[in-house]
Structures are given as structure tokens and as C-alpha cells.
Amino acid sequence: MSPLDRIRSDNLPPTSTAWMNPARSFAIIAVVAIHSLGTVVEQNFASMGPDWWLANIVDSACRWSVPVFIMISGALAMDPERGNVPRKFLSKRVWRIGIPLVFWTIVYVTFRRYYLLPADSDWDPFAAILTGSPFVQLYFLYVLAGLTLLTPFFRLLSIHGSRRLQWGTGLIFLGIGMLDQWVSMVAEVGEANIATRFLPMAGFYILGWVLRDVVITARVAALAWVVFLGSIAITALWAGFGPGEKPWMFPYEYLSPGVVVMSLSAYLLLHHHMRHGFTVLHVLYPFSFGVFLLHPLVLYPLRNLIGLPETLPAVVFHALVMPLVYTLICAAVTWLAVKIPGVRAVFGEGGPRNPHTRGEPRPGRDSDPQPTG
């Protein structure tokens, strides 16, 4: 019997999505930590000393963040309660994603060309845009834009498809994405671009919906922690001792096997642990998108001023302290910016507001569901 045949055909009872707000706040701090240490991981490998290994472990431990962002986006966008009128859905997403994508692409192309690169650089901004990744974090907006265009079709899965079909579709897309990652990075065949960058992430997007209402028991949570921590260890060791150039970058990729397992277990653990409390992260959540958009504009100048860490204490400082500093600065700037009518739109706040308020269960949803699975 196929494993899919053992899955119930109907959807699980709906649960509260309030946990997703603090989860996204936690995830954005992890994203900032990745960017805070990324250069250290790539440049300090030669000595392979304690400073590099600490940076490598922290970097590896944060890799779940982007896939979880994608999963949460899919969990919310594929909700049948949001209707199935493509024009209405897409018009709202233009405000949330489209305007920021255009504005911040211009900002970061300018920042990269005139601040980060030397004057005689032959870097082509138009070619960078066509890759769908003109700057370190902007690929995420291009991924979301592509997934948004397909969401009305994906939503048919949640409305008309059985749970078996949803699982099967999500796993097939995820498998294709993992294969694409391996072929493009390890075999060096093909390359993502503006038209295709979102496709490998579609599996995470669909599985975010499939796993959204799964509330694990304490026993399953303990097992999930073992899997989560084990996948971090595998990622860190694989990066340090894997083949190819050092560090081997493939294990860090969001569709590498270790990070896929890490991300799926992190999603379940966040749901399990963040159903209650985490007030500070709830407070940060409204500004998390602004932190995502702004943090390189703060991180690169400050890091150039401070200098890259070369000792173990310095790596600890950049791993644990500076991500919080960058996050708080960007959150404060966002708090001020979204109060200005003409600026709100570039922070994704120009359109209709999200009706789901902090800490409140969605209509008709139990805020404290019984564990399943």
C-alpha cells in the first residue's frame, strides 16, 4: 500500500493561525543572522578554526527561516476561506508584493552599484534583475511574486482536492525542487532566472498549507527536536567536510536534504510552541517585512565600520548581538515609515490591511486545538 493511501482524504479540523505572527518575527531575526555571518562563513574557512565553526553552526541553524516564510505564505494564501476569485486576490497582492518588489529592486541595484562595487566594475544591473536575485534578500520577493501568480490554481487543491492529493502534489513539487537544486549547483547544469526562480519553492508553499493544521503532541515534538537538531548538525558538518570548494555551499541551500528536513520540523515545532505567549515577537511582527526589506542597508555599512569578526568572541557578537541590533533599528525605521501615507506602499502597507489581528484566532477557529498526529 502506498504511504499516501494511509492519509485521510478530508482536511484536518481548522486551527488558529495566530502562532504564525511570532514565528515570522523569529524567522526574520534568523534571516538577519544568516546575512550577518554569511561573509564570515565564506571567507574565514581557510583556517577552519573555532571562529569559523561557530559561524558555520549558527548559519546552519538559521537555514530553516526562508522555507518557513514560504510555508507560512502558502498556508495563508491557499486558505479556502479566502475565496477563489483570482482578480481580487491578485489585486491585493500587487500592493503587498508588487510595489515593494519594483521599489526595492531600484534601491538595491543602486546601493549595490554605487556603494558596494568599485567604480570600474562591469556589473550589469539588468542582467542581475533577470536572474531574479538582484540583491542578497530580494530573490524572496521574486519567488513570492511567481507563487502568487499560481496561487489561484494551487488554491483549487485546498478547495476541491483530497488531502492525499494535496500531500502528493506538495511532495512531488518539493522533490522536483530538490532535484533542480542538485542539478544546478552540484552538476552545474542550468540556472534560476526571473521566470523560474519561484518554481523550486512551490513544494514548500503547498506543504505549508498541508501541514498548517497539524498540531503535534509533546512526544512527537520531542522527536521533531531530535530531527531538527540532527539536521543542523548534518548541514554544518556537510558544509565543512563535503566535496568541492570549501566551504561546500550546497548543504546551506534551502532545498538541500538537510535544510528541507530542518524546515519541515521547524514549521511543526513553531506551531507547537508558539500557540501562546511570545508577546515581544507579536509586537515585532507588524514590522518584520520592513526588517526584511531594510536590513542590508543597515547591516553592510555597520559591518564595514565594525569590521568582519576574526576571533571567537567577535563571531559570538556578530551572531547573537548584531542581528538583534540590525532588527531593532530596521523595526524602528519601519514603525516611522508606515506612518507616512506616501511611503506605506513600498513597505507593503498601501493596500487593504490584514484583518487577522495579533494573537486572535481566526473566525471559527479554535485557539487551543487538541493535538493530532
Image: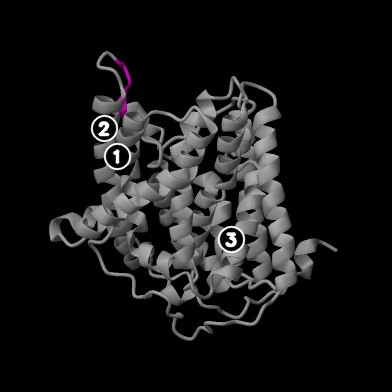
Q: Of the residues under marks 1 and 2, which one precedes in the sequence?
A: 2
Left/right placement of residue 130 relative to residue 4 reads left
Indicate whether 44 appears above or below 272. above
- For label 2, the residue is 111
- For label 3, the residue is 267
User: What is the distance, in whole Å, between disc 3 and disc 1 at their CAs?
Assistant: 29 Å
Q: Dot 1 lies on which element?
A: helix
- Please report the bounds of the magenta region as a residue range: 121-125
Q: Dot 3 lies on which element?
A: helix
**Which quadrant of the structure image shows residue 165?**
bottom right
**Which quadrant of the structure image shows residue 56?**
top right
Q: Hey, what amino acid is under mark 2?
A: Phe
Q: Hey, what amino acid is under mark 3?
A: Tyr
Left/right placement of residue 304 relative to residue 196 reads left
Q: Residue furthest front?
A: 313
Q: Hey, what amino acid is under mark 1?
A: Leu
- For label 1, the residue is 297
Q: Of the residues under marks 3 and 1, which one precedes in the sequence?
A: 3
Residue 91 within the magenta-colored segment of the rendering: no
* Foreground pick, 89 / 119: 119
User: What is the distance, in whole Å, between disc 2 and disc 3 at their CAs?
Assistant: 34 Å
Q: Look at the image and tell me in which quarter the N terminus lies.
A: bottom right
* Foreground pick, 108 / 351: 108
The reply to whether dot 3 and dot 1 touch (C-beta < 8 Å) is no
Q: Look at the image and tell me in which quarter the C terminus lies.
A: bottom right
